[in-house]
Amino acid sequence: MGEMLEYKRPPTKRNNRGFYVRMKLVHRHGRFQLHQEKNSNLFFKYYKWIIWISLSIYFFSSYFITHKPIPLYKAQYFSKSSVVSRLLFESTNSTFPQQQNNNRALLKDLKIYIYELPAKYNTDWLANERCSNHLFASEAAIHRAISNSDVRTFDPYEADFFFVPVYVSCNFSTVNGFPAIGHARSLISSAVNLVSTNFPFWNRSQGADHVFVASHDFGSCFHTLEERAMEDGIPKFLKNSIILQTFGVKYRHPCQDVENVVIPPYISPESVQLTLQKTPLTGRRDIWVFFRGKMEVHPKNVSGRFYSKKVRTEIWRKFNGDRRFYLQRHRFAGYQSEIGRSVFCLCPLGWAPWSPRLVESVALGCVPVIIADGIQLPFPAAVPWPEISLTVAENNVAKLAKILEHVAATNLSTIQKNLWDPAVRRALLFNDEMEEGDATWQVLYALAQKLDRSRRTTRVAVQ
């Protein structure tokens, strides 16, 4: 800490030839009379009147300066026909600046060192174009954003955290298009062996200040089936590290039994922006309830497991005949335009509780209806989930219509107002160049709150 300098107010000199005047305004015989102190001369009498008149003119003119009529073009902004615009204006200028000021102070001194690993651990995987754009692509997006940010340091001795960029979700099998991560444990183990052999930083903390990304179904367990993931557990060599993972639940689970930060799945900011240009947030929404995705008529698959715990099957069976529900079981490249036209977007669990629909719904102004018991949602300090979404218990899915009817008749406009705050959308999207308040910014904010795990010895004291 730097030396504290005490600044004292210099003593004020009193003028012995000065004077003290009291002014009293007294009502007497229906008139106000001005009384002076005894022995005050004629000069002081006129001097007081000059002050009195000057102050009156000042306050009179100030009133008209600060109470100017509102120009017609500004008054129209708050007309009944533009209530939505007013709500957007109010929400844009609400909670975001205060939170960001706090974040900015916390991130001021944060430093992250990125290991320069051989291409086989990361960039080689980018040969598959989907690696940079699919729902698991946050592992590559975070790497890019931190690499281009001010928090990156090329001096490992001044780093608070060490980022280990290993891409394990990029490998897609050509048969069904789903991620194959059977190679994940061996690839990460090889990377850990590399950094622990060539650098002293892993061994001094046993990996406690090292950060990895696990952006697939069951996170740090590195398996796509929950039973197998729970059985295998978290690799022993990662037990002390920090894992950025899309998987998160509020109850005890072996796949989050590690220091972790729940992050959103990846949705391309460019695709969102393009959709918003064609379908503005506040545009007409002609779809009441929307869902497009896998809905099995017979949910039990060849492994004997029930997909989505039968939730999606129940939605299909119950509401497929309801014209208010726009339910589609087939893929469609332009489905984001459908989200932009919808009031409510269903976000049921799949194999895992989380879904890319969470981000897409928020980003495109559709109220997310979350059906995944116990899910842990990303960045709750930045995204007010209870105020922008609905949560329906898995065993209440048959009552969806009544629940949504009630919301539409009561507080739908309030939820939409909160949902349309640009700061909320920004917090869930990863950009190549980190922006203040975006998803990478939120990751760094979460890491900055874990500085007690850092072994950095040359930290500059914040004054």
Image: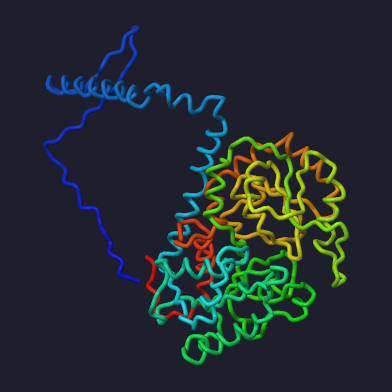
| Direction from residue 377 to residue 431 in the image, left or right | left
Q: Quadrant of residue 319?
A: top right
Answer left or right for 447 relative to 56. right
Q: Nearer the viewer, residue 399 or 328?
A: 328
At horizontal 78% and vertical 77% (from top left) the residue drawn is: 228
Q: Quadrant of residue 354?
A: bottom right
The x, y position of residue 332, in whole percent, is: 68, 53
Label count reads 0
Vertical relation: 345 (above or below) 88:
below
Q: Is residue 1 or residue 117 the one in the foreground?
A: 117
**Which quadrant of the figure has residue 243?**
bottom right
From the image, which quarter does the C terminus lie in? bottom left
| Percent coordinates x, y for residue 421 in the rendering | 55, 45
Residue shown at 52%/75% (left/top)? 452
Which residue is at the far top? Answer: 29
Residue shown at 87%/65% (left/top)? 300
Query: Is 62 drawn above or below residue 305 in the view shown?
Result: above
x, y percent for residue 96: 50, 49
Colour scheme of the picture: rainbow
Q: Quadrant of the N terminus?
A: bottom left
**Can you say whether 112 is above or below 285 in the image?**
below
Q: Which residue is nearer to you in this view: 19 or 105?
A: 105
Residue farthest to the bottom, as pictured? 197
Residue 231: x and y in percent read 78, 80
